Each structure stands twice: as C-alpha cells, then as structure tokens.
Image: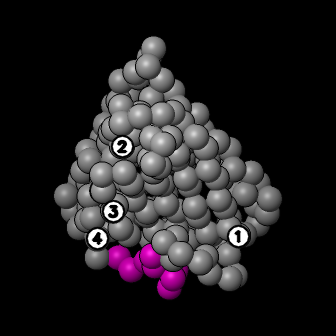
Amino acid sequence: MRSELLDARVAAELRAAPFSYPEVGATRGDLPVGYIPLRREVHIGVGMDYFQQARTALFGWHVHRAAGPKVISSSLQVTDDTVAVVRLGVGPLALRAPLRVVYVVDEPARAGFAYGTLPGHPEQGEESFMITMDEDERVRFDIVAFSKPGTRLAKTSGSLGRAVQERVTERYIEAIIAYCRPDTHPEG
C-alpha cells in the first residue's frame, strides 16, 4: 500500500482548525455522554515481537490503510502534530474525513494514539488505538471511540453510518492481526 503525504498548505490548515467536539482527550477515561460509544478489545499475540510489530503497524498507518480507507497524512509516522485526511469510497463520492492526532502514548508496554475529528468530518468525536502488553506478555489491541453524526449526510444516514464504523473497526482488528502474524508480514 502506497503512503501519501498531505500538501504542506493543507496540513497547516488542518493543524490550525479547531476540533469539531469539545471533549478532546476523553478517550483516555470516561467517555462523554451524548455520543455513541464504541469499545473493542482483542488479544493479538504473545511477546515483545508481537508488541513491536503491532506498534510499527499502528504508528506507520499500516493498520488504517490495510483496513480500507485511503489515508493521506502529514507524516509517514504518527506523532503528536500529525494531521490526516481519511477517504472512504472512490472518486467524487468518497467521504473526506479530516482529523488530527490528540495524543500519542509510546511506553515500553503500551503504545498508541487517538485522533479527533475536524470540521468537514462526517462525524464528531474521537477514536483511540492502543496496544498493551501485560505482565504475562499477552499483547492486546484496544479501540475506544465516541462519536455522533457531524454533517447533514451523517445525520440522515441513520444506522448506516454506525454500520460503516463497526465494519471499519472490524477491519482495523483484522489488519493488525494479519500484520503481526509470524508467517506473513504485509508491506505497508
């Protein structure tokens, strides 16, 4: 999968844009009311090799790209100041979803990040992706999100928008598991 970088002017505009929701950083704790919550947790392997592979896949946008959406980001690696436009669909009918990284965690046994929606994203809210290795070296991938429709199209799509988010979440999980399997290592 090819990596694409945002034009510097577009990246600067996205960095200057306000988040489209007030509860920035809320995926770190209790999720705010008034949004639809999403929580998924899956065991993806055992050992430091799995943890490091999952970390590489996540911070290099490989999980997101392998899940289907086209990711055009300001950086090939997720950092605190990364902005991106995620496109779902093809051609003029593709949904454009601008976002900015809210926080990054990069610790010896815990790594991941969260991003929040910017104006123009069909939803309002935040999503975090975290890899954790416990004392028994079991590696877990957690996705936590809260969102609500942010555009007229998203509001009128009803349960379709929620179904799309659920499917993309499943594809994130499939992608990280595939990336970390010892017998295969997809190129990113």
Q: Position of residue 84 (x, y in %)?
A: 36, 56
State which tag comes first along the sequence, 4 or 1. 4
Residue identified by numbered label 4: 15
Q: Picture quarter containing residue 124?
A: bottom right
Q: Nearer the viewer, mark 2 or mark 1?
A: 2
State which tag comes first along the sequence, 3 or 2. 2
* Residue 20 appears in the picture as rendered: no
Depth check: give the residue in front, 8 or 80: 80
In 3D space, how far apart are the residues under numbered discs 1 and 3 (Cα atoms)?
23 Å
Residues at circles 4 and 2 in contact by the CB criterion of under 8 Å = no
Q: Position of residue 145 (x, y in %)?
A: 59, 64
Residue identified by numbered label 2: 55
Up the image or down, 120 lies above or below 66; here it is below
Left or right: where does residue 47 sit relative to residue 77?
Answer: right
Q: Nearer the viewer, mark 4 or mark 1?
A: 1
State which tag comes first along the sequence, 2 or 1. 1
Give the residue at x 43% y 63%. Answer: 115
- Counting every numbered tag in the picture gives 4
In 3D space, how far apart are the residues under numbered discs 4 and 3 (Cα atoms)?
16 Å
Bin the neighbour count of mark 3 within 10 Å (Cα to Cα): few under 14, some 14-19, many 20 and up: some
- Label for residue 153? none
Up the image or down, 143 lies above or below 71; here it is below
